[in-house]
Image: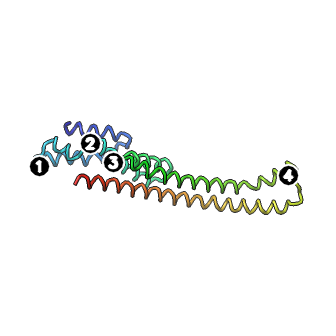
Amino acid sequence: MANNEFISKLEALLKKVPEPDRKEMLYDYEEHFEIGLDSGKSKTELIEELGDPQVIARDLLADYRIGKAETDKSASNIFHAIIATISLSFFNLIFIIGQVAGIFGAYVALCAVSFAFTISPLAIFSSFIFGYSYESFATNFFVSLSLCSLGLLMSIGMIYVGRFFYNIILRYIKFNLNIIKGDKGEKAA
């Protein structure tokens, strides 16, 4: 595989990355070939030093997705970062999916509770429609008002909890990625 074939294959594997970022990623590898050829190494030696373009592309894509999730905080970016990190090894599948699913499940449950509390005043109106007693109107009214207030406060809190969970998941993904890359570095040595 000649260096232009190596770069072409790497570029094809990174097609999901926008062109300016992809060019920046490929620049380092093109420069590696230029410096290596100037120092007298053959193209084959340089390719062997770099390794498999698919592995390199997975690493670059994971780093890119994590960086994008850090700068542009959205659910799709964190999802893409998780998928890119999982693609690095089976180890990641086991140690990322479980924790992320647990955090996501807890967050969804808390959001559902806050929503249910917020719409609880509708229960008092439905009690009138279905003919329940009017004797406990004051109690029902104040309980539903309290639950609605608590639901609104929880909803506001869920915004901050969501941001916190986003940052925790992102830090966990980066930590996991560092462990994987650290293991690869030790095997190469």
Report the number of numbered marks: 4
For image coordinates 45% across by 52% down, the residue present is 96
The quadrant of the rendering that contains the N terminus is: top left
- What's under tag 1, amino acid-wise? Ser
Task: Sort mark 4 into few (<14), some (14-19) or many (20+) by Cα contacts within 10 Å.
Answer: few
Tell me where residue 20 appears, x and y as whole percent.
Answer: 34, 45
**Could you tell me which secondary element the residue under label 2 belongs to?**
loop
Tell me where residue 186 appears, x and y as whole percent.
Answer: 26, 55
Tell me where residue 75 appears, x and y as whole percent.
Answer: 51, 49
Badge 2 is on which residue?
Answer: 52
Badge 1 is on which residue?
Answer: 39
Q: In the current view of this chain or complex, which residue is farthest to the left?
A: 40
Name the residue nearer the viewer: 34 or 130: 130
What's the mark number on residue 128? 4
**Could you tell me which secondary element the residue under label 1 belongs to?**
loop
For image coordinates 28% across by 37% down, the residue present is 9
What's the mark number on residue 27? none
- What's under tag 3, amino acid-wise? Leu
- What's under tag 2, amino acid-wise? Asp
Task: Of the two numbered discs 4 and 1 on the same chain, state the one appearing first in sequence.
Answer: 1
Using residue 80 as the reference point, say whether residue 102 is left or right of it.
Answer: right
Tell me where residue 172 appears, x and y as whole percent.
Answer: 43, 57
**21, above or below 154, in the image:** above
Which is more foreground, mark 1 or mark 2? 2
**Could you tell me which secondary element the residue under label 4 belongs to?**
helix
Which is more foreground, mark 4 or mark 2? 2
State how far apart marks 3 and 2 are (Cα). Answer: 12 Å
